[in-house]
Amino acid sequence: MIERSHPSLSIGAQCRLLSISRSSFYYAPQGEAEVNLALMRLIDRQFLETPFYGVRQMTWHLQNEGYPVNQKRIRRLMRLMRLMPIYQKPNTSKRAKGHKTYPYLLSGLRVDRPNQAWCADITYLPMRRGFLYLVAIVDWFTRKALAWRISNTLEADFCVEALNEAVHRFGPPEIMNTDQGSQFTSFAWTDRLKRIGTRISMDGKGRCLDNIFIERLWRSLKYECVYLHAWETGSQAKAGVARWITFYNHQRPHAAHGGQPPAMVYFNQIKTD
């Protein structure tokens, strides 16, 4: 809203008219320090191995490895990365205030066909000089990744974009399962699901095993793709993730289906139903 080259109003005058401080106009976000980015990469790798590590255990682990960190720093970084240990703890995936959360609908349910249940989740992607967030939507039965998006913020928009793509390409699911993060309790996300007639299911607080299949997808993606590269830009990350997800869907043998790739199982099931 502020024009640097306005013919009659200085930047200071424009700031006063907009009721903002001049310093806020000139402020440029600094991002995370290199030491914190390095810690986030270490935390991410360790969490894939020990998803039951909370803030205290992760702090002890890093201290034992020789890193001078305290619980306050590790708590902030784990929240930034959206990491939730599998046991009950203070919630790090905060619900949007004033929004309803929904019960977990998949307990004891036999999921035996495509589009009966989908799941969605967000993970942290380390870069050489920063990080991004990746959301993916996965078919619960076939494990096929239906749609995904990358973002540099945790706003709900990129999640809704992925949902819209999945629904457009494959039709609406009967059930959508997510965690209780603010992106998935937002009005934009829940309203879209309600309008297509999908039942909303949410994990119990601090229980990533309720969404176990997408957690396994993250593990495979990171060890087989993300950790093998040091992406400089978002476009490089997007291209790398796109190649791996295509490989995962169409070529990578999946143990759950006797070695068949997820896309083969998905489309074969759709043809026979």
Image: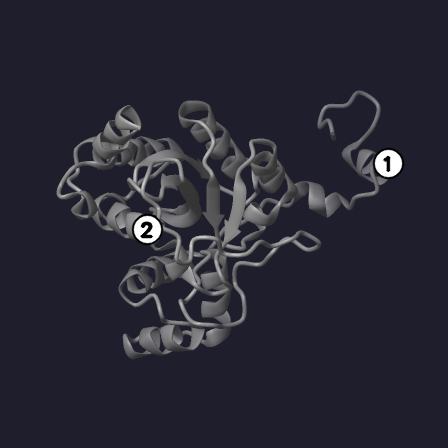
Most distant residue in the front direction: 273
Residue 17 marker: 1
Q: Is residue 204 visible?
A: yes
Of residues 55 and 164, which is closer to you in this image? 164
Q: Is residue 243 visible to us here?
A: no
Classify mark 1: helix, strand or loop: helix
**Residue 204 percent location from the top left of the image:** 49, 62
Neighbours of disc 2 within 10 Å: few (<14), some (14-19), many (20+): some
* Residue type (three-letter) at the residue carrying disc 2: Phe
How many angstroms separate mark 2 from mark 1 (CA)?
A: 52 Å
Q: Is residue 260 left or right of residue 186?
A: left
Q: Is residue 147 above or below residue 66?
A: above
- Residue 195 position in % (x across, y down): 61, 32
User: With 257 as the anchor, is 117 left or right in this view?
Assistant: right
Q: Residue furthest top?
A: 7
Q: Nearer the viewer, residue 44 or 265?
A: 265
Q: Which residue is at a point 28% across and 52% down the rendered structure image?
A: 219
Give amino acid for label 1. Leu
Question: Residue 107: image x %, image y %?
Answer: 42, 58
- Horizontal placement of 3 versus 115: left or right? right
Rendered location of residue 112, percent (x, y): 31, 43
Q: Residues within 10 Å of mark 1 (few under 14, many from 20)?
A: few
Residue receiving disc 2: 213
Identity of the residue drawn at 64% across and 45% down: 27
Question: SS for tag 2?
Answer: helix
Figure quadrant of residue 8: top right
Image disc number at residue 90: none
Residue 44, compared with residue 9, is above or below; it is: below
Depth order, front residue of 136/107: 107
What residue is shown at x 40% (from left), y 27% (from top)? 170
Of the pair 50 and 62, the residue shown nearer to us: 50
